[in-house]
Image (spheres, rainbow, N blue to C red):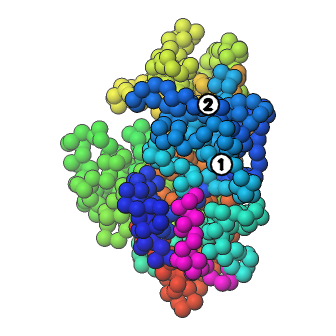
Amino acid sequence: MNQLRKTEIKYLPGVGPKRAELLAKQLEIRSFYDLLYYFPFRYIDRSTIHHITDLQGEMPYIQLKGRFINFTPQGEGAKRRLNALFTDGSGTIECVWFNRVKQIQESYRTGTEYVIFGKPTLYKGYYSIAHPEVDVYSPAKLTGGLRGMYNLTETLRNRSFSNRTMQQLIDNLLATEAVARIPDPLPQEIIDKYHLMPLSEALKNIHRPTDINSLQKAQFRLKYEELFYLQLNILRYSSTRNAKLRGFVFSRVGHYFNTFYSEHLPFALTGAQKRVIKEIRTDMGSGRQMNRLLQGDVGSGKTLVALMCMLLALDNNYQAAIMAPTEILAAQHYETISHLVEPLGIKCALLTGSTRKKDREAIHSSLLDGSLQIIIGTHALLEDVVQFRNLGLVIIDEQHRFGVAQRARLWSKNVNPPHVLVMTATPIPRTLAMTVYGDLDVSVIDELPPGRKPVTTLLRTEESRLQMYRFLGSQLAEGRQVYVVHPLIQENEKLDLHDLEQGYRTICETFPSYRVCYVHGKMKPAEKDHQMQLFVSNQAQIMVATTVIEVGVNVPNASVMVIENAERFGLSQLHQLRGRVGRGAAKSYCILMSKHQLAKETKHRLHVMTETNDGFIVAEEDMKLRGPGDMEGTQQSGIAFNLKISNLAQDGQIVQLARDDARSIIDIDPKLTSPKYADLGHHINEIFERDVDWSLIS
């Protein structure tokens, strides 16, 4: 395998230096290995011939057999193209080429029987195929069966690099001795356990499947190994970190924790909160450095859990810090926590980019001398000038909004890394959590505090707008408050969407006896905070906003969330927005306003919202619809891998199998250095040598 990685792609027959440069730049294919693992994204059955007269609607890639009637060059210079009329006897279709016009016109003849292959595009009732592949007809060419289709860039296509070119290069590669003799790094026990196809056979069948059955076996083999190596790498680093990094031992449950628990709890803890606190206490008393992910839906009581964990740190003479992604959220945490710890005499401070210089200096000095026990802040906490006397616990809220490097900087705030608890209100599907956050222990608060009622979600179209306004009026008359969220700040002629400015004017006109405030991302922080405060203090009863309110507004009196153009939002985002209401005792509603005509997938997405309040069900559906790479925040969170064939949304069962098998091996041989697993360890090092060191990531 190492030989394939080291052999530059320019040495493959059919490539050469110029094409090698193009492949490296466009597809990041630099070696034999890179090409071998550049898999087709789908497969076409090349044994089927379609008829032009049967084409209807949106068509996939197809084959047609027939003759060119004529060739007509059109335009001059850069606008020059070649049009050709092709017939199979049942009808005609236009073929068009936008480059290599002269060469193509000289290559093909009228009257000769050809097979053309491409994707038909329907325009004004007529089909055409741009840049079709053209072969002289022979029965042998129609026995090819399944044929892989590869993702190619526009630049490659413009440089005469087609799917057929890629297939020819793959054929040249598969014919080399290096591929024929490729070693299989998977342990024999796993190959036998799942009756896996041998690696060299799987690689041939993924590119050149002999039949559907062989393709499916190849896909399972390659998906499994990809996920297995990934899980093995994560668990190995996690094991190494646990052995290498000693954690501060919080052995005491003392005055602060006990007094707060017995005398100052704002409400009784749920069973889920008690369970999570117990898990965290066990971690922080174990002698190993805690690295835990706390998941909990909006309003599940994560902040209270975080506070009680900080009190444990304080009981053991350590300081604690909470880092939030926005000033609004940091201020909200400060307001909640400072109020709760005030009776205990605990000193707490807020540090953000807006903190005045004089206050900042006072905070810095009291952190250093240890008199400041809890600090709550934004990215400002990461600055080198912020130093602690004895930082023992770091809590990172909405952690997906911080990059890996930013989170890691908090580790340097003490001689040994502090305990780390990362929190998210964005539910993460199990398979994604197991992979993206696989080196973290995971706690889940899956129970709402007593008194919290589920939010009723309704889907309404433009025809129901007056009815919706009447409902808002009834809620406002009862003394409730209302959010109205828009996808845009200003009107955009190209997009027929409700914009915030127009929406603000409409709401003001519709509800003249109520005060309306507005918030969007382009406002200056001071103005944004002023508008937010109007709503928080109930001086304004309606807030018109963009998604800037998705995180960090807590108004228990708000009972209705209206989301305009709900079809424009992802499921997780809709769920986050919905979480802004239902925080008080009153029955709450989320009204999704959408166009009447919706695509099937969009309609399904909105119906999911009306059918469940469970954030984990929403997140699973979101990942199925959009794929793991598009899940909110995952790109920013520093995914240290690129999946070539597996899909976390669809391959959950394989993820679980791979995880269990990797765990069994790591339990036996944590460093993969024993004679039995040394080759496997070496292979893992090869795969992940350029990746992030997962042992130092929270």
Q: Which callout, 1 or 2, points at the residue further toward the start of the chain? A: 2
**Percent x, y of residue 625:** 65, 44
| Highlighted magenta segment, given as a residue range | 167-190
Label at residue 401: none
Q: Quadrant of the C terminus?
A: bottom left
Q: Residues within 10 Å of mark 2 (few under 14, many from 20)?
A: few
Q: Is residue 140 above or below residue 333?
A: below
Depth check: give the residue in front, 97 or 362: 97
Depth check: give the residue in front, 347 or 439: 439
Pointer 2 residue:
70
Please tell me whether mark 1 sits on a helix, a strand or a loop. strand
Q: Residues within 10 Å of mark 1 (few under 14, many from 20)?
A: some
> Mark 2 and mark 1 in contact (Cβ < 8 Å)?
no
* Helix, strand or loop for the magenta stretch, by majority: helix
From the viewer's perspective, tell me whether residue 456 is left or right of residue 549. Answer: right
Whole-angstrom CA distance, mark 1 to mark 2, is 16 Å
From the viewer's perspective, tell me whether residue 604 is left or right of residue 675. Answer: right
Label at residue 136: 1
| Residue type indicated by callout 1 | Val
Residue drawn at 34 percent across, 48 percent down: 379
Residue drawn at 57 percent across, 89 percent down: 676
Magenta-colored stretch includes residue 184: yes
| Residue type indicated by callout 2 | Asn
**Percent x, y of residue 637:** 46, 53
